[in-house]
Amino acid sequence: MKRTIVRDREVVKANFFSNNFELELFGQNQPTCLQKAYLHMIIEYGILRRNPSLKGKVIELKKQGYKTEPAFCELLGIKGDPYEGLVQYGIKERIINWD
């Protein structure tokens, strides 16, 4: 477990394995609905609802060592920072409303 700064915000992260599956707990002093990690999950869910065939491709990239957000960006052709790029994609595609 460690405290660190991510995108100019203090966060607490805990990484561990359970049944050979890597997990990460992530917390910050910000409402959940505004946290980038939450937004990424909502966007990824929206993308998969629109294009279910991407699920298997994301899983294959993850088996190759990709993290989830970079895997989605690879498949969608999103360049640059995958974490910010995925949020911008979600806004552009109206998966999330960011006013």
Image (cartoon, rainbow, N blue to C red):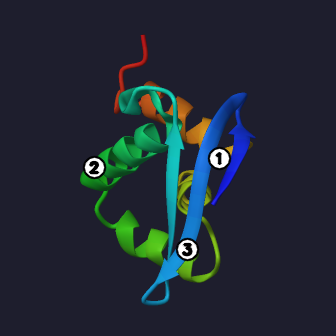
Residue at image position (35%, 42%) is 42
Say whether marks 1 and 2 touch (CB < 8 Å).
no
Q: CA distance from mark 1 to mark 2?
A: 20 Å
Q: Nearer the viewer, residue 1 or 31?
A: 1
State the residue position of label 3.
16
Is 54 placed above or below 48 here?
below
State the residue position of label 2.
50
Q: Nearer the viewer, mark 2 or mark 3?
A: 3
Whether residue 20 is visible: yes
Earlier in the chain: of badge 1 and badge 3, it is 3
Circle 1: residue type = Pro
Q: CA distance from mark 2 to mark 3?
A: 32 Å
Residue at image position (36%, 30%) is 33
Earlier in the chain: of badge 1 and badge 2, it is 2
Say whether marks 1 and 3 touch (CB < 8 Å).
no
User: Residue 82: which numbered mark, if any?
Assistant: 1
Q: Could you classify mark 3 by the number of other residues whose Cα lies within 10 Å: few (under 14), some (14-19), or many (20 or more)?
A: few
Choose top left, top right, bottom left or bottom right for residue 84. top right
Earlier in the chain: of badge 2 and badge 3, it is 3
Circle 3: residue type = Phe
Q: How many marks?
A: 3
x and y, in percent, of residue 50 in the image:
28, 49
Circle 2: residue type = Arg
Q: Could you classify mark 2 by the number of other residues whose Cα lies within 10 Å: few (under 14), some (14-19), or many (20 or more)?
A: few
- Give the secondary structure at mark 3: strand
Whether residue 78 is visible: no
User: Residue 54: which numbered mark, if any?
Assistant: none
> Most extreme residue toward the top, as rendered?
99
Q: Could you classify mark 1 by the number of other residues whose Cα lies within 10 Å: few (under 14), some (14-19), or many (20 or more)?
A: some
